[in-house]
Amino acid sequence: MKLNLLNQIYSLFSVKKNSYLIESNEDILFLNQVLTSEPILGIDTEFNWKNTYYPILSMLQISTKRKVLLIDCIKLRNLNFLKEILENKEKIIIFHSSRSDATVLSTNLNIRIENAFDIQIAERFLVGGNNKNYAAIVEKYFPIKLSKSETNSDWLKRPLSKEQISYAADDVRYLINIFEKQKKKLISINKFNDVLNASKKEANLGNQDLYVSRLAKLSDAKEKEKKLFMWRENLAIKKNIPSSFIFKDKHLKEILKVYKSSDGLKKLTNLIGSKALAKDIIENVSK
């Protein structure tokens, strides 16, 4: 019992890290100096993705072995220097659920990370079963129960609350320590490189254009259906709205059935709720 308690105390001490809020141009020099020399970085993002085609990045959290850096991406717009640092093949970037964060980074900062290690994928290799959420993985390796109170809070609102800042810091605080524990176990069963390869593949899914994975779901679609799909995607990008706001995937086949009929305009208008949009569909799909 005493040994177990000592191990728990040591575990908690090992993840004690100072947090720094990066929100001014003066902070960027410090951020650059810290990140450049670090071989391993943990990354998470906070964002809003409700009414736009692309997610809106609010905060980029980066952890090192000793620090947690919380970058306010609403206040700081010139973060181009991060691309060279995070795409550096000599570094390894630790994620939980890498595809989601890779999507946010690629669409907002043009950063495409391939040198990833995903602790969610690693845990699946180690114990099997379904994907584990971040809090569950943290609790497995540390005697800590993370709060989920800020999961759905408004990350675009400023100023950020103390609770939001604490939540954001905890989202990356444990990544590197979990990676180190998982790495030892994976090496012992000769699965470490398998996890690296699977993590890279998952991150690359996030690096690609959003329409690619969506279009792949229409593998049996005919050319007209794909054409209509891409017309909708391009319009959604132009208007910066979710493509489902124009019409949902389930309407693709039905639209193609009715648009050529004598009362196609009326039927399309009833289906998607916009006469102007119905006219555009008939004009563009008919080409």
Image (cartoon, helix red, strand yellow):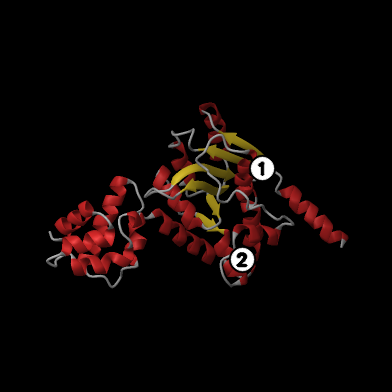
Task: Residue 64: tell me if it is visible.
Answer: no
Q: Earlier in the sequence, mark 1 or mark 2?
A: 1
Residue found 51% across the figure and 55% down from its top:
116
| Horizontal relation, residue 213 to residue 82: left or right | left
Q: Split into 4 quadrants, where in the image is the C terminus?
A: bottom left
Q: Amino acid at mark 2?
A: Leu
Q: Split into 4 quadrants, where in the image is the N terminus?
A: bottom right
Number of callouts in the render?
Answer: 2
Asked if residue 90 is positioned above or below residue 229 in the image, the reply reads: above
**What is the C-alpha distance between the residues marked 1 and 2?**
24 Å
Classed neighbour count for the residue bearing mark 1: other residues with Cα under 10 Å, few (<14), some (14–19), many (≥20): few
Residue found 23% across the figure and 65% down from its top:
255
| View extreme (top): residue | 26
Tag 1 residue:
66
Classed neighbour count for the residue bearing mark 2: other residues with Cα under 10 Å, few (<14), some (14–19), many (≥20): some
Q: Amino acid at mark 1?
A: Arg
Across and down, in percent, residue 218 comes to 31, 68
Q: 23 or 79, which lies in front?
A: 23
Residue found 62% across the figure and 56% down from its top:
179
In what element is the residue under mark 2? Answer: helix
Answer with the quarter of the image where residue 27 lies. Answer: top right
Asked if residue 59 is positioned above or below residue 122 in the image, the reply reads: above
Across and down, in percent, residue 219 comes to 30, 70
| Horizontal relation, residue 209 to residue 78: left or right | left
Residue found 19% across the figure and 61% down from its top:
266
| Horizontal relation, residue 80 to residue 33: left or right | left
Q: 278 or 225, which lies in front?
A: 278
Query: Which numbered tag is attached to residue 33?
Result: none
Across and down, in percent, residue 60 comes to 52, 43
